[in-house]
């Protein structure tokens, strides 16, 4: 940190999203970027070269997610308490967990959500054409997020709904309704069984994925809730918003 290794120029409008891939480890890695030029670019960050462009969205791209986001972030750790002998043991466990998620999910998939109300599902290192284009939201898609196990993904929208989709195929599964304002952010529980949503309506809602019902309403913020995250052990949710307050909720 502190030394600029590369400056990558190709986007023609502000870049709003950056995502590191876990693939191509021996070829210099891969980096996904997207923004207001409506294009997703795939880069080799080591060489500073662009590998491909993914086109399809008709308006700004607000959000990117990988089905491996969670396992890349958590490394060797899960919601179950584990002890490791040394760094090498951690590294080995992290690689095993990553490969297991890839196997279950059928390879790395990238998801994008846009101001054009649509989502696209990609296999960006295999082909430029999307696997699936998903419609249904009536307003801007603000965030997309894969479940930790890669089986599902969810999308939040300013149409006040959260939609659930099949993580492999992009097939529509369900719409969670209950918010009376724009939905800004989502966070999955570590076991992929629950989802929290943060909204303009000042509430945080917890949804049960199996029953497709509202598990719990979490009122308490005095204004719009902009951010939410679920702890790695699954025990707590943190939220923050316009009221300048952070709240930590216990599950």
Image: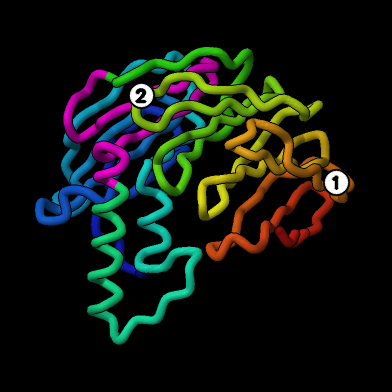
Name the residue carrying label 2.
Answer: 169
Name the residue carrying label 1.
Answer: 219
Q: Secondary structure at mark 1?
A: loop
The residue lying at 18 percent from left, 25 percent from top is 127
Give the crowd class for mark 1: few <14, some 14-19, many >=20 residues within 10 Å.
few
Which residue lies most toward the front here? Answer: 211
- The magenta stretch spans residue 190: no
State which quadrant residue 138 falls in: top right
Residue 39 shows up from this direction: no
Residue 97 shows up from this direction: yes
Q: Quadrant of the N terminus?
A: bottom left
Q: CA distance from mark 1 to mark 2?
A: 34 Å
Q: Position of residue 22 (x, y in %)?
A: 26, 51
Q: Which residues are magenta?
A: 102-129
Q: Is residue 28 left or right of residue 118?
A: left
Which residue lies most toward the left here? Answer: 27
């Amino acid at each position: 940190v502190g030394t600029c290794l590369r400056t990558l120029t190709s986007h023609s409008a502000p870049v709003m999203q950056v995502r590191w891939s876990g693939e191509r480890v021996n070829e210099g890695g891969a980096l996904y970027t997207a923004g207001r030029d409506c294009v997703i670019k795939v880069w080799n960050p080591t060489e500073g070269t662009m590998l491909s462009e993914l086109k399809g969205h008709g308006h700004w791209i607000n959000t990117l997610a990988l089905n491996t986001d969670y396992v890349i972030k958590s490394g060797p750790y899960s919601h179950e308490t584990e002890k490791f002998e040394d760094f090498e043991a951690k590294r080995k466990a992290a690689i095993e967990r990553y490969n297991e998620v890839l196997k279950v999910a059928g390879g790395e998939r990238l998801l994008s959500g846009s101001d054009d109300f649509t989502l696209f599902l990609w296999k960006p290192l295999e082909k430029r054409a999307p696997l699936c284009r998903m419609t249904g939201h009536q307003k801007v898609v603000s965030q997309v997020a894969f479940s930790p196990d890669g089986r599902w993904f969810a999308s939040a929208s300013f149409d006040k709904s959260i939609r659930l989709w099949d993580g492999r195929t992009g097939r529509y599964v369900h719409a969670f309704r209950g918010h009376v304002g724009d939905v800004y952010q989502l966070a999955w529980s570590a076991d992929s069984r629950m989802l929290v949503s943060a909204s303009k309506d000042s509430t945080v809602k917890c949804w049960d994925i199996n029953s497709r019902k509202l598990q719990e309403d979490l009122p308490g913020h005095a204004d719009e809730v902009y951010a939410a995250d679920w702890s790695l052990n699954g025990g707590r949710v943190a939220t923050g918003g316009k009221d300048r307050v952070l709240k930590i909720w216990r599950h």
